[in-house]
Image (tube, helix red, strand yellow):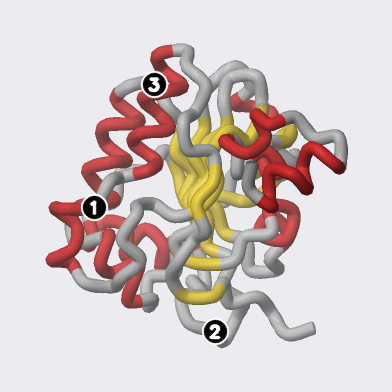
Amino acid sequence: MSKITRRLVAAGLPLAALSLPGLAHARPAPAFTAVDLDGKTRSLAEFRGKTVVLEWVNEGCPYVKKHYSGNMQGLQQAATADGVVWLSIVSSAPGKQGHFADGKAARTWMTARGAKPTTLLLDPDGVVATAYKAKTTPHMFVIDKAGTVVYEGAIDDIPSNKVEDLPRAKNLVAAALADVKAGRKVATPYVQPYGCAVKYKDA
């Protein structure tokens, strides 16, 4: 028995916890409202009963640019075609990298990149990001139909900003969505996110 196992047993924790590194991350999805790029107030509650993906994005971040070489758009298109609600969220504060002054600027960027989310939410005060403790761009969350965060973390398993790494990476969001669709427990519920730090407003 390993030292870690002995400590868990001594603490009264089940051995199954050893195989559930994301156990602490499974939690009810925090409620939120935010304005989308069309100026419409959207809420997580309006998507109750649907699988929802949250994606933090910063158009100036090299890691985001890597995934917007086609990888993110393809994932968005496949997910939404499968009935998933995909919400891209921009939490960059005014004056900081990735901030969009208004919905028109956000739409111009989305159109230029061929982005395919359900919608893009503007969160310049970082309210939604704070609720989810979003750390990086991208930082991904999958919320199941019951409103539980079932995946949180990196988009894939190769933490680089190199486009050439995409073909050999395992897409962890796609894997989580496949598990949810099949009614299985998400096999990998948490992986440390990687990317640029979310550009919160100064305290």
User: What residue is at 40 percent from the left and 29 percent from the top?
Assistant: 177
Which quadrant of the view contains residue 20? top right
Disc 3, disc 1: CB below 8 Å?
Answer: no
For the N terminus, give its image quadrant: top right
The amino acid type, in three-letter code, at marker 1 is Ala
Q: What's the residue at 26%, 56% (across, down)?
A: 111
Q: Identify the secondary structure beneath mark 3.
A: loop
Can residue 43 be seen from the camera position used here? no
Q: In this view, does 187 lie above or below 192?
A: above
Q: Mark 3 points at which residue?
A: 83
Q: Which of marks 1 and 2 is in front?
A: 1
Q: How many angstroms separate mark 1 from mark 2 (CA)? A: 30 Å
Circle 2 residues within 10 Å: few <14, some 14–19, many ≥20: some
Q: Nearer the viewer, residue 119 or 181?
A: 181
10 Å neighbourhood of mark 1: few (<14), some, or many (≥20)? Answer: few
Q: Check residue 169 in the rendering and tell me which mark sits there, or answer none.
A: 1
Residue 86, horizontal then vertical, whole percent: 44, 38
